[in-house]
Image (tube, rainbow, N blue to C red):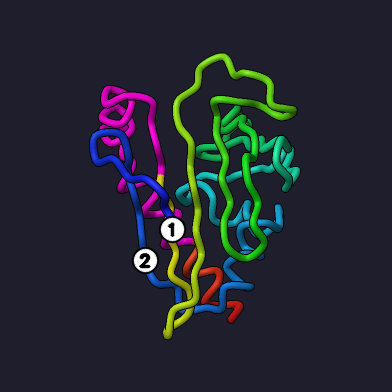
């Protein structure tokens, strides 16, 4: 559940995934599954760290066009509510250490839906300039693509 939404600061992707919550949760929390959908294909993702607990590290790399893997996300989990919510930020790194360049906090929520799982990715920014920059960087295309990839993976496994 999103406790506060501010259209000047937040971006949201929502959809129904035709798979049980447990399957969607597993696709999010199993590093091997996560790597299959986290970046828009044909790019590849590698999970270096995924310590699913508050304060745990969340570090991924990306390989575009078959090249070397480079840094993608370095963050920290803020909340993990089994089968319901994952909150992470790049404002902190593992162990609650401040990050060099904080940009966003994301809240992923999963709720039962008659057709499967109601999936919401809500991304919050510290100011309107960061929100606008994220939108202009292709938030809806990028997060929309990976949400579609997540749905396809989960629906195949359902």
**Residue 63 counted in the magenta span:** no
Task: Classify residue 28 by image quadrant.
Answer: bottom right
Task: Classify residue 89 by image quadrant.
Answer: top right
Residue 5 in percent (x, y) is at: 33, 45
Q: Are marks 1 and 2 in contact (CB under 8 Å)?
A: yes
Foreground pick, 153 / 89 = 89
- Mark 2 lies on a secondary structure that is strand
45 left or right of 131 in image: right
Q: Is residue 23 above or below residue 158?
A: above
* Residue hosting label 2: 15
Task: Give the number of the mark in front: 1 or 2.
Answer: 2
**Which quadrant, please, contains the C terminus?**
bottom right
| Residue name at image x 34 percent, y 49 percent | 12
Work out whether mark 1 precedes mark 2 in sequence or the reverse, and give the earlier one: 2
* Residue hosting label 1: 147
Q: Does the magenta stretch mainly form a helix, a strand or a loop?
A: helix
Looking at the image, the residue that sits furthest to the front is: 3
Residue 136 in percent (x, y) is at: 26, 32
Residue 157 in percent (x, y) is at: 61, 77
**Which quadrant, please, contains the N terminus?**
bottom left
- Mark 1 lies on a secondary structure that is helix
84 left or right of 4 in image: right
Task: Please rate how many residues cluster around mark 1, counting C-alpha atoms within 10 Å: few if below 14, some from 14 to 19, many from 20.
Answer: many
State which region is magenta: 123-149
Q: Is residue 156 above or below residue 28?
A: below
| Residue name at image x 41 percent, y 52 percent | 2
């Amino acid at each position: 559940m999103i406790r506060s939404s501010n259209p000047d600061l937040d971006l949201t992707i929502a959809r129904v995934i035709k798979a049980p919550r447990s399957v969607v949760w597993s696709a999010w929390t199993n590093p091997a599954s996560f790597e299959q959908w986290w970046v828009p294909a044909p790019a590849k993702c590698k999970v270096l760290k995924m310590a699913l607990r508050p304060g745990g590290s969340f570090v991924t790399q990306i390989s575009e066009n078959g090249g070397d893997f480079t840094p993608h996300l370095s963050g920290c989990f803020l909340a993990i509510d089994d089968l319901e919510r994952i909150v992470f930020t790049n404002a902190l790194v593992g162990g609650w250490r401040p990050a060099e360049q904080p940009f966003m906090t994301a809240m992923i929520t999963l709720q039962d839906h008659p057709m499967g799982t109601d999936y919401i990715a809500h991304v919050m920014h510290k100011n309107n300039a960061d929100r606008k920059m994220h939108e202009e960087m292709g938030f809806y295309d990028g997060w929309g693509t990976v949400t579609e990839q997540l749905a396809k993976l989960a629906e195949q496994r359902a």
